[in-house]
Image (tube, grey):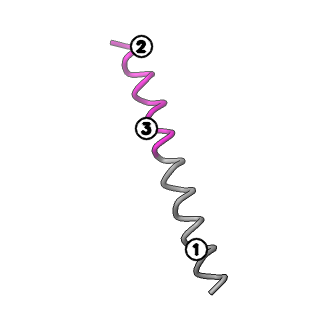
Amino acid sequence: MVNQRDQSRTKNTSQSQIQEQKDRWTEHFEELL
């Protein structure tokens, strides 16, 4: 059970990191435009 919870937590973390990168890219893009 603990293992499953850890896996889901890792998944959420990676997803939030990806979202963070997207936001950063969007900011860069807007600056370029």
Q: Is residue 26 left or right of residue 8?
A: left
In the rendered image, residue 29, in percent from the top left (x then y), is placed at 38, 22
The residue drawn where x is 37% and y is 17% is: 30
Residue at the far left: name it: 33
Quadrant placement of the C terminus: top left
Q: Residue at x 54, y 56 (%)?
A: 14
Label 2: state its secondary structure: helix
Read off the residue under disc 3: 22
* Distance in Å between CA atoms under marks 1 and 2: 37 Å
Task: Report the Cα–Cα distance between label 3 and label 1.
Answer: 23 Å
The residue mark sitting in front, 3 or 1, is 1
Q: Main secondary structure of the magenta part?
A: helix
Q: Is disc 2 surrounded by few (<14), some (14 to 19) or many (20+) residues within 10 Å?
A: few
Residue annotated with mark 2: 31
C-alpha gap between disc 3 and disc 2? 14 Å
In the rendered structure, are the residues bearing label 1 and label 2 in contact, judged by CB atoms less than 8 Å apart? no
Q: Position of residue 3 (x, y in %)?
A: 64, 82
Residue type marked 2: Glu
* Residue where numbered disc 1 is placed: 7
Q: Quadrant of residue 10?
A: bottom right
Residue 31 lies within the magenta run? yes
Q: Is 22 left or right of 11, judged from the image as shown?
A: left
Q: Sequence order check: which comes first, mark 3 or mark 1?
A: 1
The picture quadrant where one finds residue 31 is top left
Q: Amino acid type of disc 1?
A: Gln
Q: Residue at x 52, y 64 (%)?
A: 11
Q: Which residues are magenta?
A: 19-33
Where disc 1 sits, the SS reads: helix
Secondary structure of the residue carrying tag 3 is helix
